Image: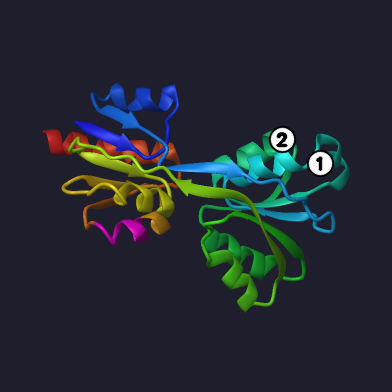
Amino acid sequence: MTVLSTKILTASQKAILTNANITVEDYDATNIEFITPKIDPVFKNIIFTSQNTIKAFLNIVSPKNLKKNSYSAFCVGEKTKLVLEKNGINVLEMANYGAELAEILVNKHSNETFLFLCGDKRRNEIPSYLTKHKVAFKEQTVYQNTPNHLTFDTNFDGILFFSPSGIESFVARNNLKNSVAFCIGTTTASEAQKHTKNIIIAQKPTIESVLERVIGTLKIKSN
């Protein structure tokens, strides 16, 4: 069994697959380029939708200003929450998906004002929901997402996708054919549905959960 990951995996993540006798190739289907605008000092409530937004934020804000400003974070994803806390940023709310976080902000923090950090290919769930419910926010693009188009000749048993833009990048040069599309979450799966019906969604939106689904599915197929 051979799979392709559209995101570079760590050595320990690869080992999870190889220990299950699954061969893995990996590459980054999209390249991230951070841009460094100034963070508006008026805002203390920051919405982080990914680890990329944290990296961009930490590139812009000095450790001194980080301490001085006492930012509160509202984030998508457990891993994002862990990285924020590791860097001393207080996380007030965490949800697994952007739409869930938007609902929490409207229901519990509608009188607050937010700075929404995002990439240039951001999803619409959070800004549209906040606008609809008249929650004040400012949107700031802090990184650019460019496709990394590679062509693959291998017929993979599974392809691991972690974002809609990763799927768009892959299908620009390749066909999913009979491969199972393993998706990190529902928004990624929605994009995959444009190209295949053979989709499996991770139980939790984490890389490790995707890997668990790969092993569980491909072991059944191989038996």
Q: Which residue is mark 1?
A: 66
The residue positioned 70% from the left and 50% from the top of the image is 73
**Is 2 on the left-hand or right-hand side of 182?**
left
- On the question of residue 51 being in view, the answer is no
Q: Which tag, 1 or 2, sits closer to the chain's start?
A: 1
**Is 132 on the left-hand or right-hand side of 149?**
right
Magenta-highlighted residues:
189-195
Q: Foreground: 55 or 84?
A: 55
Q: Which residue is mark 2?
A: 87
Residue located farthest toward the left when viewing the structure as drawn = 223
Label 1–label 2 contact, CB within 8 A: yes
Q: Quadrant of the C terminus?
A: top left
Amino acid type at mark 1: Leu
Task: Check disc 1: other Cα within 10 Å, few if <14, some if 14-19, many if 20+.
Answer: some
Q: Foreground: 121 or 183?
A: 121
Q: Foreground: 112 or 158?
A: 158
The residue positioned 39% from the left and 40% from the top of the image is 209
